[in-house]
Image (spheres, rainbow, N blue to C red):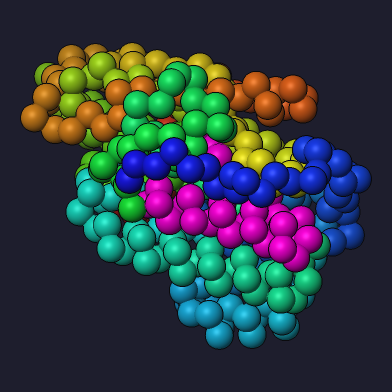
Amino acid sequence: MTTGVRIGEGKPSRERPGARPPYRLAGKRVWVAGHRGMVGAALVRRLAGEGCEVVTIGRERLDLRRQAAVEAWLAEARPQAVFLAAATVGGIVANDTRPAEFLYDNLAIELNVIDAARRVGVEKLLYLGSSCIYPRLAPQPMAEDTLLTGPLETTNEWYAIAKIAGIGLCQEYRRAFGCDFISAMPTNLYGPGDTFDPVASHVIPALMLKTHRAKVEGAEAVSVWGTGRPRREFLYVDDLADALVFLMTRYSSAEIINVGTGLDLSIREVAGLVAEVVGFKGGLRFDPTKPDGTPRKLLDVARLSALGWTASTGLKEGLAETYRWFLSHAAREGLA
């Protein structure tokens, strides 16, 4: 996908970022769409201190890919604010081998929820995008205005395209209907509630599971996908939840906004930290026959920092909390 056209180009917003008054969550009905996922669960934890009523519904009762069902449920539930954290997600292999599913599911979910929210008069909606929306070789760190200035990373192209469509929908609904819908782009996430799978998951949980098993089995080394040279930024999921509540209450603009730490490490360094936290004494064996993905992914978080928010959890601290959660859940999920 190569285009120099940016979403909303030629149709500038008349609003200044933050031009609307602060939005209060206290006393409101707040729907967390995707509450059982890692991000959604962290949001539910964070919202417990906001004095609002958190509304949730599981996928066994509501399939967000079904338009009529979503419209009917929203019309009945009448939330005043929505965090749209529901999505079909996965690591490099999942994205690369199931592109149709990633494209359809994510397009359907965002189209149905955003449009139904507009129809029932939701006061404010925060749409959760992804840092993978930016070009594969975007200048680093990646600022918000690099969106659609170059080709996407091919291993997650269709997921990225779906997320970009959701951004456009929020922007155009804001412009056409006056909806206070905003979009946040988080960096790579990890933490309690993550999906631990050596193939389908993202880099940190996959590394943690493999390293834990290597420790238990007394292996000499852990196999790590790729060369270990790509650089990545990682944000603890509870920090993300705090940032999203911060943005919901203090930010109002058609412009997307990055959420990250502003710091990155090589995959080799990350694998070493995971081994240290897990207590694995063996070595690391890199497999260059496996894909590296984007060479570097670091977000420019100047816009969010200027508003007054910064991440508070260091990577080693967050990895330790994640490993504690993993150990408490591994046995019952058959992972250990």
**Position above or below: 327 against 195:** above
Given residues 192 and 131, the one toward you in this image is 131
Question: Looking at the picture, how far across and down is residue 270, in whole percent?
Answer: 35, 20
Residue at x 69% of width, y 38% of height: 242
**Image quadrant assignment for residue 295:** top left
Relative to 79, does residue 263 appear above or below in the rendering?
above
Q: Is residue 90 left or right of residue 240?
A: left
Q: Main secondary structure of the magenta part?
A: helix
- Percent position (x, y) of residue 284? 19, 17
Seen at 63% across and 36% down, the residue is: 257
Q: Toward the viewer: 104 or 44?
A: 104
Residue placed furthest toward the left: 289
Could you tell me if residue 213 is visible in this image? Answer: yes
What's the residue at 49%, 31% (across, down)? 146
Residue at the (43%, 34%) spot, across then down? 149
Query: Can residue 40 be spotted in the picture?
Result: no
* Residue 47 coordinates in the image, percent (x, y): 74, 49
Image quarter of the N terminus: top left
Residue 44 or 174: which is nearer the viewer?
A: 174
Quarter of the image for the C terminus: give it.
top left
Q: Could you tell me residue 147's position as x and y percent?
A: 49, 37
Find out whether residue 259 is within the magenta segment.
no
Q: Quadrant of residue 102?
A: bottom left
Q: How many numbered callouts?
A: 0
Lateral position of residue 81 relative to residue 332, left or right: right
Asked if the stretch drawn in magenta spans residue 177, the answer is: yes
Q: Nearer the viewer, residue 173 or 216?
A: 173
- Magenta range is 159-187
